[in-house]
Amino acid sequence: MRRLAFLAAWLAAALAVGPAGAATRLYRSGAVSVPVVAGETARSTIRVPDAGPVSHVVVSLRIDLSRAADVTVRVRAPDGTAVVLSAERGGAGRDFGEGAGACRDGGGLVVFDDRFGTPIARGKAPFRDSAYRPEEPLALLEGTAARGVWALEVDALGAGGAGRILCWSLELSRNVVETRTAQSGRVASTLSYRESAFRYRDARVRIVRAGRRRLDEPLARLGCGGCPTWAPGLDSPGGPIHVRDLDSDGEPEVLVDLFSGGAHCCRYSLVYRYRASRGDYGKSVVWWGNVGYRLVDLNHDGRPELSTYDDRFAYTFTPYVSSLDPVRIWHFGHGRLLDVTRGFPAAVKADARSLLRLYVERRGSTIPEVRGILAAYLADQYSLGRERQGWAVLERAYRRGELGRGVERDGYPAGRAYLGSLREFLRRTGYVRSARATAARQAAAAGRRTPAHRAPARTRTRPR
């Protein structure tokens, strides 16, 4: 799973309404064809099955009309509370929304949201695929019961109001406590929170061990403390909370996955470890950067590995969108992480092959940016003790001009300067040193010595 897959998974969850465990959900009418007749009120309904007081509402709709200004449109909650979305607005133009496919793909719908957009009073029909602030605030619906039949009502006040309701949807948040739980043996843990419009509050973690509550604390926001997008890691594989024995000592640890907020960074985990001498839990914070991690038993020995990518490569040699990271594998023990990447050569080889294929594809594309790919590929080769082969690939890329001409391109090192910067970066981040240590261990195991002074082929990359 490459960085792009991690990001795609996160983006899908961030954009989807109602990820698992969230109280905000999208309820659709589907494609309908409800006539709007002059002098009458047309009505289309959606049944909401989920209980709880409403804490936020967004309405999206598509109505085909001869003249938008000849209608009043409102949404009505199950308890009868109504909010006017548009009252004879739009001038001489027609329609709310546009396009025959709007009800299938969601594009072309008009969105009514208190937070965003132009006031509907200043809008002009045909209303396009955009957001408007409604005539009356949708906040008037907050506190009403979500469960029941919601209605979209269209009053046709003149002959120009004739048309059809084609589809509409409700994005509803409910003020309820959501919980996620996990258990292993005698240790059980619960993460609870409230969510409204994808903003989270009142997050709390509890741990019960052998029937006794050993921890109960609120979760402070780390990193971007004021970011509204701070959230539990609901899209994490297996959910945002795990109870696993990470160090095979018979005592499960508790992991809580979180997202600090910001454009795309950062993901982090709180790891709670039982301290028998004190009868409580100590806490460690592990930062994953942009990429997250997976809990997976790679060698099937019963001890899970934490498989991720080295986020230090992001932005280092290319803009973020072109940055790639080498695979990194960790063990957790005694309250800290231990890098065991080189103990899993099959995973590293698979990652290197994936990067090499991507490099070949990208260099022949219309945007042949390969510096980020090759940096991650070379790091993998160092982890495998194959840095000579890795540098050979980069030298060929340099001779073909794939690393850019001159010393800089788009604000990042290019050409021979890129090679020098990459070599120094790998040394600074431990890849060069660790590779030498690996080679020494391999040589010792084979009963021979490797001259420490012998410089590998990478010396050819020194800047001229």
Image (spheres, grey):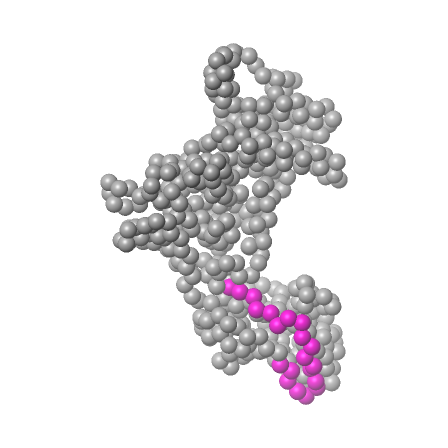
Residue 157's x, y, as percent? 68, 85
Number of marks: 0
Quadrant occupied by the N terminus: top right
Q: Residue at x 57, y 69 (%)?
A: 27
318 sits left or right of 185 in the view = right
Q: Residue at x 74, y 85 (%)?
A: 159
Residue 413 makes an appearance in the image: yes
Image quadrant where residue 303 sits: top left
| Residue in the foreground of this view, choosing between 74 and 353 | 353
Question: Can residue 436 be seen?
Answer: no
Q: Nearer the viewer, residue 464 or 101?
A: 101
What span is colored magenta in the figure? 24-43
- Please state if 388 lies on the left or on the right of 188 as rendered: right
Relative to 8, say whether 392 is above or below.
above
Residue at the limit of the structure toward the bottom, as seen here: 39
**Which quadrant of the view contains residue 211?**
bottom left
Q: Position of residue 339 (x, y in %)?
A: 46, 32
